[in-house]
């Protein structure tokens, strides 16, 4: 574990859409590290025919309220990115299978 990269984690949820983890940078003594920014990392899930697909994404925000307000748009972007990634994996698998 890197002592210079420690964070205190708090989890907030509406119990519907997902969670927001507030990652507060701390020093090794547990006090707030003012030299680094607080991070807002979110998690959500989408249900696919293959099962549940977890999504994790960072929200650029200055406050928890701002992160919560941006959650929906950021979750939509994360879903689209996941779908694009899946499509690319399918394309690669299909092209690899044709060369076998």
Image (spheres, helix red, strand yellow):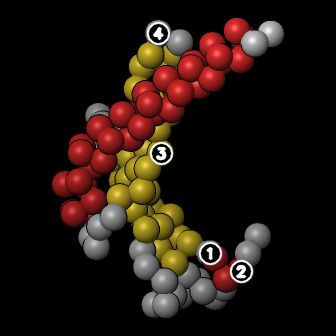
Per the rendering, the mark at residue 77 is none
In the image, residue 4 lies at what x, y percent?
67, 82
Q: Residue at x 29, y 38 (%)?
A: 76
Measure the alpha-carbon separation of dots 3 and 1.
19 Å
The front one of 56 and 8 is 56
Q: Earlier in the sequence, mark 3 or mark 4?
A: 4
The quadrant the N terminus occupies is: bottom right
Q: Quadrant of residue 93?
A: top right
**Residue placed at 24% from the left, 45% from the top?**
73
The residue under label 2 is 3
Residue 11: quarter of image: bottom left
- Say which of marks 2 and 3 sits in front: 3
Q: Which residue is disc 3 drawn over?
A: 56
- SS under mark 3: strand
Front-lying residue, 6 or 100: 100
Give the structural element (helix, strand or loop) at label 4. loop
């Amino acid at each position: 574990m890197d002592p210079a990269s420690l964070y205190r984690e708090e989890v907030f949820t509406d119990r519907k859409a997902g969670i927001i983890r507030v990652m507060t940078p701390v020093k090794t003594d547990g006090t707030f590290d003012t030299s680094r920014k607080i991070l807002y990392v979110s998690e959500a899930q989408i249900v696919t025919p293959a099962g549940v697909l977890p999504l994790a994404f960072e929200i650029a925000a200055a406050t928890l309220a701002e992160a919560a307000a941006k959650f929906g748009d950021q979750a939509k972007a994360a879903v689209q990115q996941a779908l694009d990634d899946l499509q690319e994996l399918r394309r690669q698998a299909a092209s690899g299978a044709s060369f076998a």
